[in-house]
Amino acid sequence: MSPYAQAGHKEDCDRPEYAQQYAAGFNGELNGALNKFKDQDKHYRARLDGMKSALIKAGAWTDAEASVFMVKASVTDDDAKSLEAERKKAASDFKVQLLSLDGVPVIAGGNKAAELRATCLLGPAAINKADVLYAAAERSWKLLESKVAAEAQMKNVALP
């Protein structure tokens, strides 16, 4: 959770200097969260592509079998459905927070102090929702990775 989302944060946002300080750091914090998502996606896609390639190269899977397995393991299996629903809800909640923040300048109507205060008030919830989404995605990725690893072990295929 954001270091700003502590007891008294809401009241502190009423102070223009605090709201300005929070808003100044918020974009960096949000960009950091977005970069964390990109890094997570890149890491797991590369890892899973390597695992999938090893299974195909060993003759344990065809390309089509690999694709079917990945979809089933990540979306249609019961455990995957549960995690996917959790991830989708977290993504939706995060999107709502981002849309709320996007509307702040219009709602503030050119009042910079109101814009800073609104960002200060809404920012911690957006970062919190980003953290929840990251954790949900991490659980989904780890489940898929464990299923591919179990399949490789069952087929006696060494993974990278």
Image (cartoon, grey):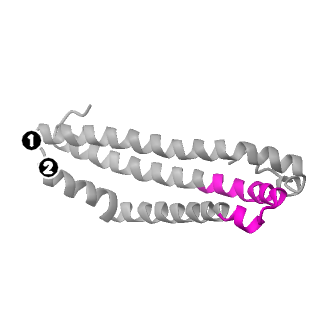
Determine whether the residue tagged by mark 1 lies in a helix, strand or loop.
loop
Determine whether the residue tagged by mark 2 lies in a helix, strand or loop.
helix
Q: Residue at x 64, y 54 (%)?
A: 128
Q: Is residue 157 above or below residue 102?
A: above
Closer to us: 36 or 108: 108
The answer to whether 75 appears left or right of 64 in the picture is right
At label 1, the amino acid type is Gly
The answer to whether 136 appears left or right of 47 in the picture is right
Closer to us: 75 or 27: 27
- x, y (%) of residue 112? 81, 56
Q: Which mark is residue 10?
A: none
Q: In the picture, residue 94 is in which quadrant?
A: bottom right
Asked if the stretch drawn in magenta spans residue 119, the answer is: yes
Q: Which mark is residue 63?
A: 2
Q: Quadrant of the C terminus?
A: top left
Which residues lie in the magenta part?
103-129
- x, y (%) of residue 16? 88, 51
The secondary structure that most of the magenta stretch takes on is: helix
Q: Residue at x 61, y 60 (%)?
A: 98
Disc 1 crowd, CA 10 A, few/some/many (<14, 14-19, 20+): few
- x, y (%) of residue 146? 33, 46
The answer to whether 121 appears left or right of 152 in the picture is right
Where is mark 1, residue-wise? 59
